[in-house]
Amino acid sequence: MFRYLYSVVLLSLCFVYVQTAKMHNLRSHALRMTVGSDEYSKYWNDLAEDELEKALRAQNLNQNVSKNMILFVGSGMGVSTVSAGRIFVGQLAGKTGEEFQLSWETFPHVAFSKTYNTDAQVADSAGTASAFLTGVKTKSGVVGLDDHAERGSCASTESAAVDSILHLSQRAGKSTGIVTTTRVTHGTPAAAYAKCPDRNWENNSDIPDAEAALGCKDIALQLVEDATEIQVVLGGGRRELTPTSTRDPQSSGRFGYRTDNRNLIDEWVALRPEETTRYVYNKGQFDDIDTDKIDYLLGLFDRTHMNFESERDTSDDGDPSLEEMTEKAIEILKKNEKGYFLMVEGGRIDHAHHGGEAYNALNELNQFHLAVAKAKEMTSEEDTLIIVTADHSHTLSFGGDYPDRGHPILGNNIDDNDVSDDLPHTTLAYANGPGGEKVSESYKKYGHRPDNTRIDTEDKDYVLDALVPLDDATHGGEDVVIYASGPMAHLFHGVHEQNYIMHVMQYASCVGYNKEHCEIVGGSTK
């Protein structure tokens, strides 16, 4: 009897082993089929040779004058976000993800940017945007002013104003535009046109009376009164430009924030030629714009920030995508024979990170990827410098328990061999943020981390675990990447101070003060 039972158990174990091996082999075969023949040396050798050939071609430097410039800013798009985003977008396309290339990852020139503000080790968006748009680093929370300015002090702004690349481009006769998924008066877009000691002074009611008495203008007012040459402004933020008496057209029962009774939307339109100017607030109106006939376009698609892509209404009553806004802006601006400067911000990558919502952050990066691809499709490397970078990073970490290739980037790691509490955990996590609250509460209540066994960690609203409990996840302080293609893109090469970006832009496009080289490379200093 004992021998019989022993034989049965042994046969059962052998059966389990064989079945497990079969499943492993099937899985390995499926992986090889998914990624092509990358198990073989030839695949990797051919891939490397192709990259080497591209690198050798990049030695033929493009020293043309940049007629057009497009600066793409992925807010909060640090290295870990790009890496996770690459896999996320690749997996959306049915691939394992790791081998995927985002639209800017094919650019031939890459560098790092140091993001700190003059008074902060971990940067704020207003200070970083001021650096890469004006060429001068400044304090956290300050817009378009140098380091002499003190945050919140109107008196300190005297002689502190600095010109942005947008201003210099306009003086050179170029067309200019701003596209963002945030409010158009938010920190990053504001740095392109405004000069304000506090990024939060978006409308007149935000400014303390004592500071307003010294003559400081709110950011929305500067957009209308002091940036009259901008031809395209697309994003959110209607409430900052409309008075408290004006009902929002899409948000029932909501009104504007301005207490000066000024409707700056109407004023923006009135300052431009009637027949070639339009204001739109939904996708239907936006889609109806004939770019051959319209030269000035103001589109404000939400009373505050635009919706996350996962929540975007794609009907005529909803919003255009970042890709669609980028395309429309280029179609309008490219009509200028002298060229254009366009800044495009994927601003809600950052907002999703602040909330610990990795799905939304990576999904917003996907839209950013599509917008860059559209710009590449519509322009030529011969006369258009495209720069893709970030204002700062975030505290997203990319680890897990050595997940297999092709593992869902937002999924759980269920191999608990090395985990002392035997609980699953996600590949991605945050160093701080709202996810820290649930971790803290779980320890208090159960004595261990939250159990994600029955939780859909790939849901758009799922908040990732975090180490330190904070209401909002903070920015990250590490360097971010600069990717560049087109005229003078080779000037990005190593580790740069963030303000260097603007100096390359003005040199490449022959605007501003540094123009001695322009006639030599075929441009004009006139």
Image (cartoon, rainbow, N blue to C red):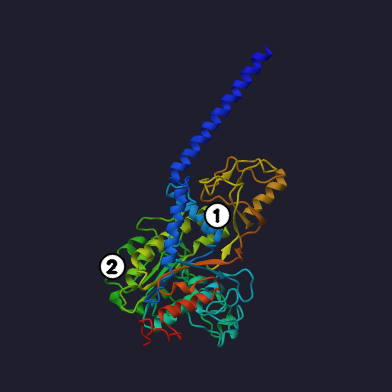
**Above or below, 253 relative to 26:** below
Q: Nearer the viewer, residue 75 or 52?
A: 52
User: x, y (%) of residue 211?
Assistant: 58, 82
Residue ID for mark 2: 290
Q: Earlier in the sequence, mark 2 or mark 1?
A: 2
Q: Is residue 241 visible?
A: no
- C-alpha gap between disc 2 and disc 1: 37 Å
User: x, y (%) of residue 514?
Assistant: 46, 85
Q: Mark 2 packing: few (<14 Cα in 10 Å), some, or many (20+)? A: few
Q: Nearer the viewer, residue 453 or 245?
A: 453
Q: Nearer the viewer, residue 150 or 412?
A: 412
Residue shown at 52%/33% (left/top)? Answer: 23
Q: Quadrant of the N terminus?
A: top right
Q: Is residue 394 visible?
A: yes
Disc assigned to residue 357:
1
Amino acid type, label 2:
Asp
